[in-house]
Image (cartoon, rainbow, N blue to C red):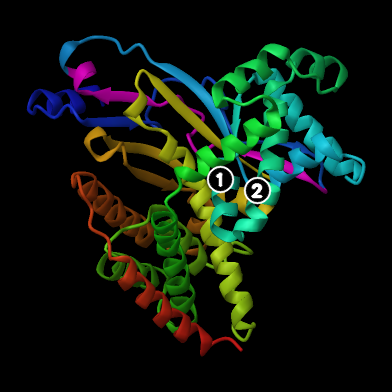
Amino acid sequence: MYQQYKNYFTSTDDTNAHFFEIAASPYPSFFYEESLFFGNDSHRIHIIDQFCGKRPALFNHQFCTNNSQLELMFWCSITLDSHVASLLHEYVENPEPLSPEKYQTAEAFILHLAETKCDFSPLFYVTEAYLKSTSEDFNRYVPKVLASILKLQAMCENTFIKERKIKLKPDAIAHYCNLYGEDNLDDCANAWVKQIASGINKKDTTHLIDFTYASLLKMVLIKFVDNKGVVKKCEQFEKFMIDELGIRLARESGLALYYFSGLAGKLVNTQANMPLEHAIHDLKATAWDIFLLKMPETLLTPNYLPEINVSYVATSETKLYELGTLFDVQHLACRTDEEGTGIPLISLSMESISKKVDDVAIQKLIKANEEISFRRMAVSKITACSPDKLKAIIFDLETQLSNLCR
């Protein structure tokens, strides 16, 4: 592995390429060796590990040409889905209405955060609310949730571990007030919301999620309209992504294989003759789930070396957990001249599929898809279809779906 990268970097002056090897990394994770959950059968919070229980190994020009060790600082962050962020807010501000199961799950999760001192981020929660809510609702509710998260981040961990009480540390409060230039945590939360929202490009984020939504629409149409086998359906789906969308989406490709094999269950649960608005709502919700699952690889960037953020998703949705455990990020290719944008190689759990579909055919399909991924890693700038073209594609696909639904 090292020699492969050494050969590349010694034959080029490319100082902007950075390769994270994950599945092949010899180093165990500092943080999580596998996915885990907190709570009980009726309510759980899952932490999803998509990094194979490994610590990413970084290969770049400095490491491969200077024979010098990289002094890296790894830190862990947990990206909260919207349900978890809301549950933490309820636990902090108004725990009485919570069911015993939800209360115990929230407490167990907060206890874990206190014991590990992991950073936890409402980035996804704010992004989803910013794109989906009215301005009035966003400004009314989101700062309250972030105020509760700030209180958890400013609490004394030892007190919570021993007494299960949230006791704020004066020095932590002073830190956040100094950081945001405010006088109290509520005003700090307002400033934090504005800071996160200012960094969200609505148009670009919507464009990214629409790629996934279009892929899911096509996936459903292929299954209901095309009577060919699993491999042929997958090939048709791959052709749609490359020829129409101008981009190959790794998780969507893997999910299509599961879906066409009849193994997706509730992950993509669109049925013929269901109301069209329900089908669209469910597919858009799944698109948002996949967007959340992509955040850890987005946050794994060389832009802030020597610091490296290894991020995990926390969710209370069983469907999202099941979707997340299907995939592992094997490898991530990044370029600092492209703002650290990473092109991942995603592996798919094949155990269930190999029982349903001819193994030779599946391995051939996977090999072909991996070759596409590797070829696209060598391209520093991928040109996907424009927002206007994507909207036209989605309109056409929704029109086709309307003929199957009611």
158 part of magenta stretch: no
Label 2: which secondary element: helix
Residue 283 position within the rendered picture, expressed as x and y whole percent measured from the top left? 55, 68
| Residue linked to disc 1 | 124
Is 110 rendered above or below residue 249? above
Residue 286 position within the rendered picture, expressed as x and y whole percent measured from the top left? 56, 61
| Residue linked to disc 2 | 82
Residue at 24 percent of width and 24 percent of height: 60
Disc 1 to disc 2, C-alpha distance: 7 Å
Q: Quadrant of residue 67?
A: top left
Identify the magenta region: 42-64
62 part of magenta stretch: yes
Is residue 214 shown to the viewer in this render?
yes
Residue at 76 percent of width and 43 percent of height: 87
Q: Nearer the viewer, residue 193 or 19?
A: 193
Tell me whether the residue at label 1 lies in contact with that at label 2, contact meaning CB atoms closer than 8 angstroms: yes
Q: Is residue 115 left or right of residue 384?
A: right
Residue at 62 percent of width and 64 percent of height: 265
Is 35 rendered above or below residue 157? below
Q: Amino acid at mark 1?
A: Phe
Residue 82 position within the rendered picture, expressed as x and y whole percent measured from the top left? 65, 48
Residue 330 position within the rendered picture, expressed as x and y whole percent measured from the top left? 39, 38
Q: Is residue 160 left or right of residue 363?
A: right
Q: Amino acid at mark 2?
A: Ser
Report crowding for label 2: few under 14, some 14 to 19, many 20 or more residues within 10 A (C-alpha).
Answer: many
Q: Quadrant of the N terminus?
A: top left
Label 1: which secondary element: helix
